[in-house]
Image (spheres, coloured by chain):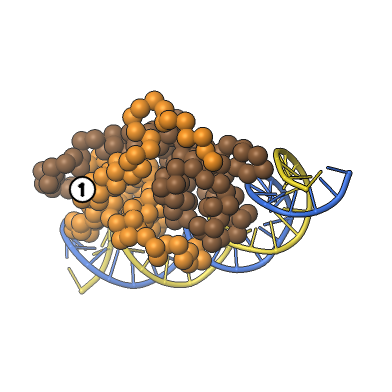
Chain colours: A orange, B brown, C yellow, D blue
DNA sequence: CTCCTTTATCGTAATTTTACGATAAAAGGG
DNA sequence: CCCTTTTATCGTAAAATTACGATAAAGGAG
């Protein structure tokens, strides 16, 4: 990304959300999150096995997820144990839920806005 | 992406969600969505002006958002009027809200899972 | 201490994404 | 019909991402 000037006009919260979405935007990382949610907690090796990708590749993906605040890694002996980062997920859920609050409510359709 | 075999083990809904997240994962597109939510509806040219990117670039981003089902474009004379796609946003919100239902609830912390 | 297991980081090749200018298509005004 | 406005698509260059093997670091077993 060649430095988008537009980005600087975002609040810290918006930037955090954007960072999370970018991390989740990769299918492998999306899948890892699902796996972690299902397994509660597990070791890097388990995720490697699940994804069938190279260990170094998975480690890189985990780093992205960690830096986005979506997961936590705790060193457990020689291994590292990963699990969902509750606060991060809570933030993500809240932001998405609050996003576009007026438009797109639960109602079937919006009033015909007649575009332009 | 070099064809990740893992992807095929996803349900249609999961794939749709992954596609949306990928579209939103780009900061420019994320910003466009915010802009559209704020403006309700507007023409391509307005978005071009907002982003300060080339018209062809914006058109490409809009295509990605359209194909992800996040926005709608309606031809309005020589121009195209874009607006949020209500059903898509509703789907996104519901999926995210339902995601990771057990872990990361509103409670302050999870029970100490003791990792591994 | 030495070996084994596990993971992170580094360097690099391949792929994908992004951005741009140029061009085409479509609609309306005069 | 010709011109202007608006947008989409195409081709291409630059940048970022992704994946891999090799290597290093760190902890436990014996």
Is residue B35 visible in the rendered image? The answer is yes
Q: Position of residue B27 (x, y in %)?
A: 44, 56
In this image, B4 relative to A95: left or right?
right
Q: Nearer the viewer, residue A38 or B61?
A: B61
Q: Position of residue B21 (x, y in %)?
A: 42, 44
Q: Nearer the viewer, residue B53 or A30?
A: B53
Q: Nearer the viewer, residue B28 or A9?
A: A9
Q: Position of residue B56 (x, y in %)?
A: 63, 54
Is residue A63 visible in the rendered image? The answer is no
Q: Quadrant of residue A102?
A: top left
Q: Nearer the viewer, residue B68 or B14?
A: B68
What residue lies at 34% left-to-right and 55% top-to-bottom? A14
What is the chain letter for disc 1? A
Q: Position of residue A84 (x, y in %)?
A: 24, 47
Vertical relation: A73 (above or below) A113: below
Mark 1 element type: helix
What residue lies at 45% left-to-right and 62% top-to-bottom? A6
């Amino acid at each position: 990304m060649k430095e988008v000037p537009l980005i600087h006009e975002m609040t810290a919260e918006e930037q955090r959300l954007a960072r999370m979405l970018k991390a989740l935007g990769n299918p492998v990382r999306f899948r890892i999150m699902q796996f972690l949610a299902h397994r509660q907690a597990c070791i890097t090796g388990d995720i490697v096995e699940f994804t069938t990708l190279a260990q170094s590749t998975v480690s890189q993906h985990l780093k992205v997820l960690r830096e986005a605040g979506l997961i936590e890694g705790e060193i457990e002996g020689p291994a590292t144990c990963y699990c969902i980062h509750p606060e991060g997920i809570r933030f993500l859920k809240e932001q998405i839920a609050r996003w576009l609050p007026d438009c797109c409510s639960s109602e079937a359709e919006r009033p015909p806005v007649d575009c332009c």
